[in-house]
Image: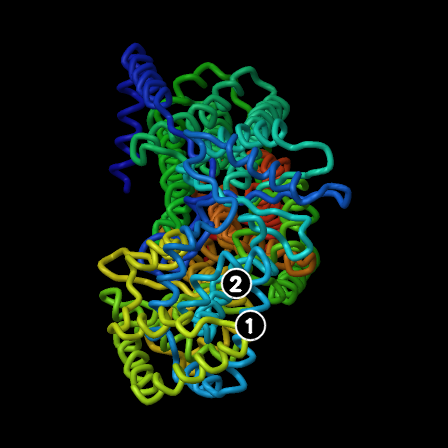
Amino acid sequence: MTSFFTWISKCFYFFSRRRLVLYALILIIALLSGLLLKSIKLREDLQPMLPSGQSDAARDISFLQQAPFMQKVVFHLKAEPNIDRKTLTETADKLAGALKKPYYQRVISGPTMPSPEIFFPWLLEAIPALMTEKDLQAVKAGLQAQSIRDQLQEIRSKLNSAEGWTLKGLFQEDPLGLHQTVLEKFRFLNLFKGMVVKDGHFFSADGRNVLLVADTPIKVTDSQGARALVLYTQGTIERSAPPGIRITFLSGHPYTQANADTIKGDLYIILSFASLTILGLLFLVMQNWRAIFVFLVPASVVLIATAVTVAAYQTISAITIAFGSVLMGIADDYPIFTYFSLRNRGNYTGEVVGEISAPVLFSGLTTMATFSALFFSDLPGQRQIAFFSIAGIIASLAFSLLVLPHFLKGSPPVRDPQYTGMSPKGRTYRVLCITGWLLFLALGLWQGSRVIFNGDMRSINWVPKALKENEMSFKQTWGDFRDTAMVLSEGRDLQSALINNARLFAYLKGKIPDEGIVSLAPLFPSAAIQEENIRRWETLWDKETQNRVRELLVREGDRAGFHPRAFTPFFERWSFKPARVTLEGLKKAGFGDLINSLIIAGDGKIRILTLVPDTPQVAALFSKKAGPPLDARFVSQSGFNRILSQAMIRNFIQYIILASLMILVLLTLLFRKAGKVFCAMIPVVTGLLVMFGVMGYGGIEFNLFNIIASILVIGLSVDLGIFMVSRISAGYDTNTGRAVFLGGMTSLVGMGALTLAHHPALYSIGITVLLGMCGAIPSALLVIPAFLNTKRDFKNG
């Protein structure tokens, strides 16, 4: 380590004799940073803060993003009482026709059913393959004279109406109404509460609301595309909505746009406020025009760190950029302490620069050690923030120790009085200070135990009032379809997935009300199940049964006024081998959109989605204790939140342990005495317990971004501890209480700037770090001197 400090001294002398080389290097760094920043690609959404990799949380978020309607835009048309149904459907058709490429590919205003000539034959062919044992028992009970008599009378009544006459062919091929059993299974495919089909459109039960579903090629995570889509959609709605009809739309895109615009607006406020306030503080405390050189270090460091991050990642998150104000608060500590140390010495030689570099360097190393813990995070955004911060700290250390001293030459020395301990002196003061500190820690520990870890990403999303109102209106009419849970039945191929899906449906039946289940199982069973259904059908529909039913139909048909051969097509159909329900057949019958939404292929597997209510009772059905089907995976927003909360607790403990171990190793290398190491950690412990104590007392939940805040509190607090212990230490009289105070205050400003943000994620970082630093700064200035009141304390170890 001594050789490193000697190297710093040699660098100082080298550049002292070659100022032009130093200026050229600074210019080259500035130009390279400018070139990299010119091609910056800013990512404005929160996708980087979602888990990646192979963790349970990462897999769940991947599955949630494949949920039905996740990439679609849903329009809600709500009519006033004086608007008739015809006007409402005409408005829906006008809007559907106005939604054009490149923003929309297709708009669905009603079920994409083929003509009756295609659908009804498929429906009749599917009867044997879809008839369960329970269904056949009901059919068998209906093959009695009275039941057939009632059925034929009902057909006769319907044929007297215009609608019934169009179904004449269906009645001839199915006079027993067997197709009703299959139609009944369609209720398991209703994604929206109370939705009915009228005039070929999706209506609410009261007939005053219409639904449109639109496909868009624009990804929800594309913030620029989302912004353009939202603006286009809003303009189209304004042109299409007549008086008395309110049109709103729901998709992930408005949320992406709202978050992106809010974060971008916050960036200007945060960075401007932090820069101006830090500059003002430096001039106020330093009272020297050379304070501008100290300010230029953190200001340039933010640009350099951004450029390096862009070079490494190609894109950079807006959250990372917003972290620039925090980096300024961290990065200005090193030039501040270098400034005061050199001016206190009043001697600008290479030996002095090398001598004062020890606490500055170790302070930077401990802060980098705390951030390096984030490299083990499952969140790409946290890893990028760690890289950004470490790059900035390295740049700040380099500028503070290798460049800044050259610009401070000629500054008059400003010597503080020799440090002799905190005033008032004496044992009583020390006992009171330490006792009060311990009581304060106990209070923080008590209240901190009440902190709740919240993994709900929605709690850190910015949702404008208008979007909340649209959500509420949609939920009241159509239900909360976005908050349903998914159960994935997985298989190596379609048939194995269908088998598992059937097991899942059988497991859920009776445990969840039918209206709460959306499943393909009743309409698309596996080939094995279809074969079993057909075998039972053929057993029931033997020659004897056919002849008996034929006689009943002729006799009862004659009574109802039907020709003796009216139902010949019915018997001709069942003279052939029953057909099987296939994927291609379902798509031809008009179920292509639904099939594509509920059957997902990927990773060499087929997954079939079943939708169920996202409630604790349903989630309990998929606990290990409940014994659900082994191939079923329950995925829900609330379940994801629970997994993420548990992962947050585990990761937080891991980060704290890892960061603490690395810090202790570095502090031991620097101070080599347990007493000094303990005192340097005082601001860290105090800052964390104050942060958690206030959060627990105030009911502030701990989220993903508070993990970053905790790392910040550790890194910034240990800086204060190192500099304060070094100040009092006989071996390192390198900085003053004024420098410690100024470093802490500029850090507070960098963090405090984030509390000006409107976005919950940025605000949560700012407020929690602000709380932590409000505990760390006083403990550094008051408690450390109380423990180490005189140089004798150090000498006694």
x, y percent for residue 125: 33, 67
Q: CA distance from mark 1 to mark 2?
A: 9 Å
- The type of residue carrying mark 2 is Ser
Which element type, helix, strand or loop, lies under badge 2?
helix
x, y percent for residue 95: 56, 34
x, y percent for residue 690: 62, 55
Q: Quick check: 328 above or below 48?
A: above
Tell me the number on the disc at residue 616: 1
Label 1 close to label 2 by CB (< 8 Å): yes
Which element type, helix, strand or loop, lies under badge 1?
helix
Residue at point 42% right, 55% down? 116
- The type of residue carrying mark 1 is Pro
Label 2 environment density (alpha carbons within 10 Å; few <14, some 14–19, many ≥20):
some
- Between 734 and 264, the residue placed more toward the observer is 264
x, y percent for residue 495: 25, 69
Disc on the earlier residue, 1 or 2: 1
Q: Disc 2 marks which residue?
A: 638
Image quadrant occupied by the N terminus: top left
Q: Quick check: 500 above or below 688?
A: below
Residue 646 appears in the figure: no
